[in-house]
Image (cartoon, helix red, strand yellow):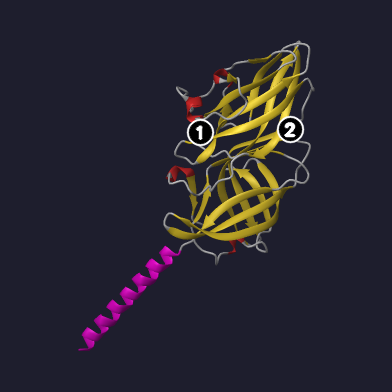
Amino acid sequence: MMRYLIGAFLLGCGVVALVLSTASEASALHIVSVRETHTYTMQEDRTLAFEFLANRDDTHHFLEEAIHGAGIVDLAGVKRYPLELVSVEKSVRPFEGEVYHHYRLFFSPTITGGLSTLSIPKGALELSYGRFKPLKLPIGEFNVTYEETIGDALSLQAIRAVPGNEGHGLSAKGMFLTLENTAGSDAVIDEVSLNSKHVLPDLAAARGMEDSGPPDDFEKLFDGYERFKRPEKAEVLVPAGETKTIFVPFSYVEATLLHRFPLQVSYRIDYQSGRLMFEDFLFINTNRFACENEEAFYHVRPD
């Protein structure tokens, strides 16, 4: 009889241990971030925001008082762009059939001058916690630029992003540019850049638009266009004294989300080089976590 009681007790302990183990595994911290292209121009008063989902809210990782330092680093740990935490916003939202805690972390840059450009193709937000282990959260591409406009003959009258969805989420797939050339000679545009390695404006596929207004069907703009390739070199002419609107599609070298971006237009007039800069602007405001494509996300499970 005693032997059966001992056996039943051990079996019960085993069941309890299994339940506790399963519960512990189910509640293990799971943090989700988005594959995104972050590309900015930097000013003294600007703020950067990064968004994450977590399946628990009883962790120190997103507590303002727990975060002692922050910065953007490359995955090899060679480059670092230091940041200062400003605030943390928290809400809840559904993700993959469950309720997750949504964190938005706001930072100010601690470097705002003395650097022309910084490019980190595969970056992570690194958070340090004093005596606790630092946490690296992949965010995708991260770029900043401080370059300024050179020359005033060419001006940007309007810019409008064209949205689209390739299964990775709603993203900017191209743009309309309206440029005015006030010089007495033609302006030759030889490069348009978003300061991104993953999303490249394709001048070779640019086309002039008679009407600067949006078309009835955005998808017709991309008929026959291969969006995942590296574009060829090309030039676009803006005649002397004229205003011209062009549509420029974006070539995606790597799948990513692009919601805001700066613009740099390089040109020459009478063999003199000029550059037109437009500060980064939020063109598409959307739910980054609405996509159902697993490749759109990074998953982090801290120890």
Q: Residue at x 31, y 74 (%)?
A: 15
Q: Closest to the observer: 297 or 210? A: 210
Q: Which mark is residue 254?
A: 1
For the stretch drawn in magenta, the main secondary structure is helix
Helix, strand, or loop for circle 2?
loop
Specify start and end residues of the magenta stretch as a single range: 1-27
Q: Closest to the observer: 141 or 43? A: 43
The answer to whether any part of residue 274 appears in the image is yes
Where residue 38 appears, as percent x and y from the top left, is 61, 40
Counting residues from the start of the chain, the first of labels 1 and 2 encountered is 2
Q: From mark 1 to mark 2, how far is it between C-alphas?
A: 24 Å
Q: Residue at x 48, y 29 (%)?
A: 219
Image quadrant where one finds the N terminus: bottom left
Report the amino acid beneath label 2.
Answer: Ser
Report the amino acid beneath label 1.
Answer: Glu
* Magenta span includes 5: yes
Q: Badge 2 is on which residue?
A: 116
Judge whether 184 appears above or below 3 on screen.
Answer: above
